[in-house]
Structures are given as structure tokens and as C-alpha cells.
Amino acid sequence: MMMNQVTKMTFELNHANEDSGIWIGGDKAYVQEWPLNPEGAPLIHLFSIDSNQLAKHIPSASLPVDTFISVFSTYSAADYFLDQVTYTGDELEWNENILGGYTYVSVTPYSIMSASPTSCIPLCGITFSEVELREHDFPAFSFLTSNPPNGMHGISHLLVHYDIVCQIYSGDFPAPYQDILGLSDANGYLMLRKDNSSTEAPLVGIFFVQTA
């Protein structure tokens, strides 16, 4: 039986572990101008990564050196928004959702941070543990991985130009944000452009949601 080792991320509310190199939520992110979606609403900050610091703990992570990454998404506590952040390989989803700006990934060599203009997810630190996934497992938790996990579909064409970094599970977020990705059992995926495909891929980083 084939096994795939991944690094599980456990969110710890009100326990910012800066040494880990990755954290959830909070009111600051690595971006000079806070991103807005096509309706002009501020995106919510999901998580940030200090690549060099994270690489100390997870050397196998697909991360560019000397970079600071922040991931944002559209969110509403009252209105349905799942369709705006979903990508399953459909060209319309790509053009309207990913290129349209309903999600956004900031990748910068500068550690300059800006404050959120809207409500934010409570700050959570992250601790790591190694988990073995069996060939037919569909993991319902957040983890770092260099291999596309089971349940991720319609994205094989992206692997030419992008590396998978992590799966983020909506239900791992603190209350009342377990539906931060549209549904509590939704998964979000961060992918970063490979070094050798800078002229072929339109975005340095992409983030999108999929559900079962």
C-alpha cells in the first residue's frame, strides 16, 4: 500500500507561534495595499507564511526562499459566496474568480505589513505533526504537502507551472469562522508558481476552494 507523508497543521487559538513561520488570521498581513474583491469589499486574511522560517521546520515545503506570503479570500457571514472562490478547472471560474480577484495571494521579498480594514479571524498559531496518508485517504484537516491530495480535482494542468504548498480545511478555523471557505467541510489550496515558468503563469500565487 502506497503511503504519503504530510505535515499536519493544528491551529491553536490565541497562541501565536511566530517561530513556526506560519499563522492563521490576525489583523496584519504581508501586503502594502489591502486587496479588494471585484465588488470593492476588503478580502479577509486567511494565513501568512515567512518562507525562510517555515523551511527551518519543514525543509520539504515547496516555498521560494526570502519571501513573505499572505493569502486572502472573499468572505461573508450573511451572504452565499462559495461560487466566487471555487476553482475546479473551469475556464469561467479561472477568469472570474482567480484572475478576477475574489481570492488573492501576496508574495513579496519585504516583511512590510498592513492592517486589516475589516473584521479579522482571531489569531491562531500552528503546531506541526507528521501524518501518513494511505493511498485512498481523503484528509479532512489542514496540512503542508508537495503532492496534490486526494479530493483535489481539475487542476492537473496547473501542475506544469505551479507547486502545491498546502491544504487548508475550513473546519479547522476558530469560531465563528469554520465556514470561512464557504462550507465547514471545504478545502482551500495554496499553489505557488515554479521558478522556471515565470513567463507562462499569470500569477505568482493562487488560492482557491473545492468541496466534495
Image: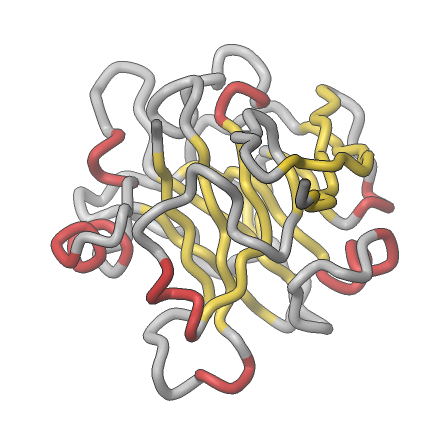
Among the 4 quarters of the image, the one containing residue 126? top right
Q: Position of residue 63 (x, y in %)?
A: 66, 65
Q: What's the residue at 59%, 33% (across, down)?
A: 25
Q: Position of residue 159 (x, y in %)?
A: 44, 66
Q: Position of residue 111 (x, y in %)?
A: 68, 63
| Closest to the observer, 55 or 210 | 210
Q: Position of residue 141 (x, y in %)?
A: 60, 27
Indicate the quadrant containing the N terminus: top left, top right, bottom left or bottom right.
Answer: top right
Among the 4 quarters of the image, the one containing residue 175? top right
Residue at the farthest top position: 175
Say if 26 sits above or below 180 in the image.
below
Q: What's the residue at 76%, 35% (across, down)?
A: 131
Relative side of 93 to 157, left or right? left
Q: What's the residue at 41%, 58% (across, down)?
A: 206
| Closest to the observer, 136 or 82 | 136
Q: What's the residue at 42%, 43% (across, down)?
A: 152
Relative side of 75 to 196, left or right? left
| Closest to the observer, 188 or 134 | 134
Indicate the quadrant containing the C terminus: top left, top right, bottom left or bottom right.
Answer: top left
